[in-house]
Each structure stands twice: as structure tokens, then as C-alpha cells.
Amino acid sequence: MTGDGREAERTARAALTRVIEPGDEHGGRWLREFGAVELWRRLRSAAAGPEALSGASRQRIGGYRLRAATADPDRDLTAAEGAGGRFICPGDEEWPSQLDDLGDAGPLGLWVRGPSHLRIWALRSVAVVGARACTAYGAHMAASLSSGLAERGWVVVSGAAFGIDGAAHRGALAAGGATIAVLACGVDTVYPRGHTELIGRIAEQGLLVSELPPGDHPTRSRFILRNRVIAALTRGTVVVEAEYRSGSLATARHALKLGRFTMGVPGPVTSGLSAGVHELLRGEGVLVTDAAEVVELVGGIGDLAPVRSGPLLARDLLDPVAARVLEALPGRGAAEGRDIAREAGTTADEALARLYELHSLGFVERRSAGWQLVSGATQTADARRGGA
Amino acid sequence: MTGDGREAERTARAALTRVIEPGDEHGGRWLREFGAVELWRRLRSAAAGPEALSGASRQRIGGYRLRAATADPDRDLTAAEGAGGRFICPGDEEWPSQLDDLGDAGPLGLWVRGPSHLRIWALRSVAVVGARACTAYGAHMAASLSSGLAERGWVVVSGAAFGIDGAAHRGALAAGGATIAVLACGVDTVYPRGHTELIGRIAEQGLLVSELPPGDHPTRSRFILRNRVIAALTRGTVVVEAEYRSGSLATARHALKLGRFTMGVPGPVTSGLSAGVHELLRGEGVLVTDAAEVVELVGGIGDLAPVRSGPLLARDLLDPVAARVLEALPGRGAAEGRDIAREAGTTADEALARLYELHSLGFVERRSAGWQLVSGATQTADARRGGA
């Protein structure tokens, strides 16, 4: 595809995120049949009759046309950019291709806000989800699990909701770790309001991700459909506390269906908030009690990315800031993030984002003392590239 | 075997329980090679050299001879009878043949005290075991699980220890249910002293069982070896609270090795007393949260006894008291235990013991309102017998 073609595709997909609701398989099928540009043209044009779209009832098409008439992708793309965001699509270098496992129900594109590289972060990510009205025990477990995951170089993904989600994000941030919030509203929109500061911190130090365009608000069905993105994006999902028939269990079921690892943290049988988790653990879910057990499970089997030995990229294919951060690591032993940032001439947040990318790519390891080079990693990658 | 032969066998086995420690595979092998009477004769006789016993070191045999010299089976059998007990051996009608799964490490015989029929009770029994120093949560779970099992007509087996064991026995008794304590001391010996009243109640309403002769005291290794009898006797074992490397986990491991169902009740990850259970549940143990889930698991697959349709015995093969209790049940609907006892002219404890036997044999069912006849059970059994 030409550069212009890619831009037209991006604009059309951005427009379609305002027209087609998350998880709408009809919309997804039409997108696959016609391509984004042609589908967008047909929905905007009075000329092309709805009969051209297979499976389209007059009423359904009418709803899409109404939304398409007011959609303004250029305005949305500008708004996102203004909020420090971007819109990424399938085929982009940053696109996490594991989302394609969702088929026609997959996202049309993702609105992203934050300094890090979504695809690379998602390679080593685990979802930690659970009840909004959690207990102190649940909040403690979510936070300590997420801190432990962050300390092991894993990215914690959750939904920025009250309760378990918030504790998970905070646990990762408290350990100086990486976290992604998948929202059921625009990435420039704060929901819940009580998490304004937390969501702001995630936008600065982590990533906000949404299928919905700037300014869009959450609805009940958007919350539920958001869960499939969390499940698909990550290597596995840990449910910390959940009642029967809860949204967190829906995420777990998505994860199972997608072949991701599905885990649960047990609790007192006398707590209704553990009942859903225990139900999961009586089925295919795996009982976990700490971050080491989670990593043992999700880290044991090949990456979602193609399996390779050594780093995933040759060193000189890294982006300039990542390359500078890699240069800033000492030849021996570990250094702390802030020292690496100073040496590389970046902010601490920027350095952290790149360090997690470099970790996912196999260049660096996280140690309790900080970050250090994986021995032989850069040589191996360069040698392999040289030999190819 | 003739009547005299059986009595000589019983006397020899009773004697050997004072000579050979529980779980001693050397002793078990010799017993298999020589038979109880001949082994007892050799250990008592100075004439038969130890070289006749394969694998016998001079020192080992010396120890057995010392014990044999002072053993007095007639005195032990009389003492047991005086305490309302009996001694049962393989081949006896009351012998639970699933204990043969223990091979050469199996019990030589069992000292039993209580009004019920061990083999029949054990057909529908589940072990509920766990930590001595349990939490209030653990005690609550053990008691409610055991009450629920008793209400469903299942016999609760445990070790009469403080903590989970005691809560399990009490839960079964509180529900008017059946319970068996497997002791690591003589059935006329109370250990722990703080459970004097509980053990007394079990002797009256349930069963006390031990490999050890009257008057013998528990030792550390006897506690541990007692666990294999609990595991082998029952359809499955539920561990309620257990630390890493605890005796309760040893019971669970025995149960797994013997192909019995092995279950665990989850608890807070923050409790060290749930750590052992969670370890079990991360392996082959099944997570259970109530009695219904336990029964669903252990009741789903065929009895340890041969599978038959309808009752296991023809009605006129029942012992006279059981037959009277069966007669005392109303033709329609349920009756309470004490009314059945009055009608049958027995004590309430006696009636309860027989009702559980009749339940295991398929004649009666337990309902919340009391006990009722299984519809068509007696006719079927009589008809089948008549047709044979």
C-alpha cells in the first residue's frame, strides 16, 4: 500500500470507529469484504444502496448512515493528537497482531495515548482484573501481584475501574513498572472521575488504549466488550475477585476461548467476591497465589510474537530513543531507571517506556537493583543480522 | 478356613498388632509369606531361626522377638471387649476391603469401637482433615462441609485431632450424622485429652478405629502412618487448612497415590494455613467450596464395593436389628431417627447406625425431614434373589 493509501485507510478506519460499535461482527465482516475506504465511502454516499452490503437490514444500515453523516475523522485524529494520542491500525508497526484472534469482532483500530510502544509492551503483558466493589483482601492481592509482575518485567493490563483494576494499575506503578489501561471510552475522557489522577499517571507512564474515538462515553455494553480486548491483548488473565456472572469472569471466558492462560486468585469460600473465581478454578482456570506462579505459567511457552532466539530486532533497527537508552546501560551490572534516563538524556518516564520495550525485545533484563544488559544479546542480534 | 482356624488367625493378628508397627512393609511381607499364625509362632519360638524370614536382619528380628515375648492377645481382645470394642481382620464380613490397596503396608487388622458396621459405613465415606492450629475460618468450613456431607448421607472420617479434625467430627454429629475417627492410639485410649468428650460421643454414635492394640499410645510416626488408613478407607479426602509439608497434605498425597479423590478448600492467599491447600490445588487436587461439590465428585463414579443395581443385600440377609429398623420406616414419606428408633425398639444411636448402613446398602435415603424408603428397593432385591 502506498503512503497515501495507508493514510486513506487510517482515516477511514478512524471514521468507522465512530460508526461501528466495538465487537459488531456485521461491521467487521463488511470491513473485511469491502476494505475500510470503500465501506466508509458506501456508508457516506447516498448513491450506493444498502443492498450491496450482505446481511444488512435496512434498519441497521440506516443507523450506520446516521452516525456516518456526522463522523469527522480529521477532527477526531486532530483531537487525539492534541491530547497526546494517536490512532493505530492493523498493518501498523505498533499494531498488536494478536488482536486478529478476535476475527470479525476485533477492533477496527485503536486509539492510544502514552509514550510507549503498544505492540512491544503487549508481548509480555498479563491482565489483572476483578470486581469493582472488592474487599481489602482483593485489593491487597491485586496490588502485590501487579507489583510482582512489574518487578519481573511484565506489563500489567487492566480496565482502570474502581476496585481490583485500580489496585492492579497502582501496584504496577508503585513498583516503577509498566501498565496499560484499556478503556471503554475515549482516551481523552476520564472514567470513572474518581480515577482522574490515576488515569493521568497511566497516560504519562504507561498506555491508555481504546476502540472508541475521542470524547466517546462508556455504556454497559462497551464495558463488557472492552473485556475481549483485554483478554486478546495479553498472554493471560488473572481474576482476583469476582462474583458469579460478573464482567471479570467474562474477560476470563474470553481469554479461555482465545487460548490465553486463565488464572484466578483464591479467597475465603465465605466471601461472595471469591465465588466467581472459585467457579473458574473448578473449571479450566489455574490457581495462582503470587506473581512468580503467574510468570511461571505465561512465561513458559513461546511468545505471541514469532519465536526466535536472542533479541527480536537487530540493534540498529531500534528507534533512536530506544537505541540511546540501550547505549546508556552499563557494560556490567545494573543501573537504576533514573540514572539511565540521565545518561540517555531523556525523561524518566520515556526511559522506562523504552526499557520495557527493550526488555520485551530481549536486550535488557530487570533486576531488583535496576536494569542490565542481557549478556550477548546485542552481539547475537547483530551477528544474526550480519549473517542473514 | 474352619471356625477354629479363623479364631487362631484372629488371635495371631491381634498379637501381631502389638509386635509390628503400622505401615511396616517387612512385617506385612512376612505376614503374606507365612500367614499370621505361622509368623506369630516363629516370632514366639526360640527354635525357628530368624534366617527363615527373608529380608530379616538379626537386629530387626530381635526387636520383634522382644515385643512378641510380652504380647498377650487374649488379654488385649478381652480388654477391647471390655471397652465395647472388637478386632476385625481381612476376610471378616466387617473388613473394609479397600484397605487392601495399601498392600504390604496395610493394617494387619483393626481395633474398632462403636455400634456401627465399618465396611458398610466406609462405602460412603469422605475424609475431612486439616491443621490442628486452624483458623476460625477453617473450623467453620470443616464444620459446615461435614454437616452438609452428613445431611447428604455421607460418613465423615477424620483423625480426632484438635482443629479441623475436631470441627469435622462435631459438624457431622451436629447434623445427626455419622462419623468415624481413625486414631493413632488404642481405641480405649483418649488422645488428645481435651477431646475426651468428643471421642466418647464418637464411640457411642459413630466408630473409633485403630491399628494399635488397647492401651497403646500415639507417637509421631504413628500419627503420620494413621493418615494412610484415613486415605485408603474413604472415597476421597478433603483438606480444609494445611501448611506446607503438613500431615494433612500427607493424607492427601496418600489419597492421590491410592487413586482416591483429593480435594481442597481454598482460603486467603495471605494465610499460611491455606498455603498447603493451594499447593495441592495447583497440582491434582480439586477445588471444592461446599458439600454438594464434594458429593458431586465422589458420588459420581462407582462404589468401592462391586457395582450393582438396587440394594447390595437381599432384605432377609440383613442383621436382625437392621431388619427391624428397616421395618420401622413408614411405607410413604420420611420419619425422624428418634421415631424410627422407638418403632424399632432400639436406642436412637443404634437406629442411626443401622440407618446409615441401610443407606449405604441402598434401602433408605436421607431427606431433610428424616429417612425414607428407596422406592422399590426392597422389592427389587427380593425379586432378584428370588429369581437367582
Image: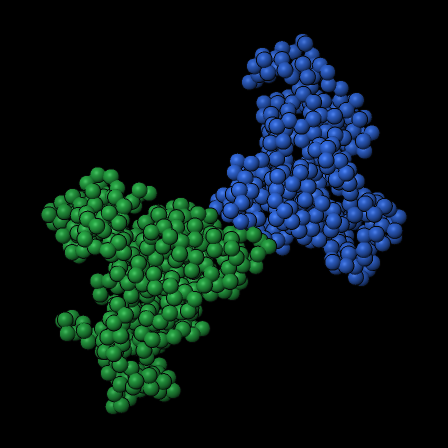
Chain colours: A blue, B green
The residue located at (71%, 40%) in the rendering is A180
Give the image location of residue B189, x and y in percent: 35, 71
Residue in the foreground of this view, choosing between A285 and A108: A285
The residue located at (37%, 69%) in the rendering is B190
Residue in the foreground of this view, choosing between A195 and A256: A195
A301 on left or right of A71: left
The residue located at (62%, 13%) in the rendering is A62
The residue located at (26%, 49%) in the rendering is B338
The reply to whether residue A215 is in sight is yes
Give the image location of residue B295, x and y in percent: 37, 48
Give the image location of residue B310, x and y in percent: 22, 46
Vertical arrangement, residue A192 with respect to residue B262, above or below: above
Residue in the foreground of this view, choosing between A363 and B283: B283
Name the image quarter holding the N terminus of chain B: bottom left
B295 on left or right of A11: left
Q: Quadrant of residue B238?
A: bottom left
Give the image location of residue A117, x and y in percent: 75, 41
A228 on left or right of B387: right
Q: Quadrant of residue B380?
A: top left
Residue in the foreground of this view, choosing between B369 and A12: B369
B186 on left or right of A102: left
The reply to whether residue A31 is in sight is no
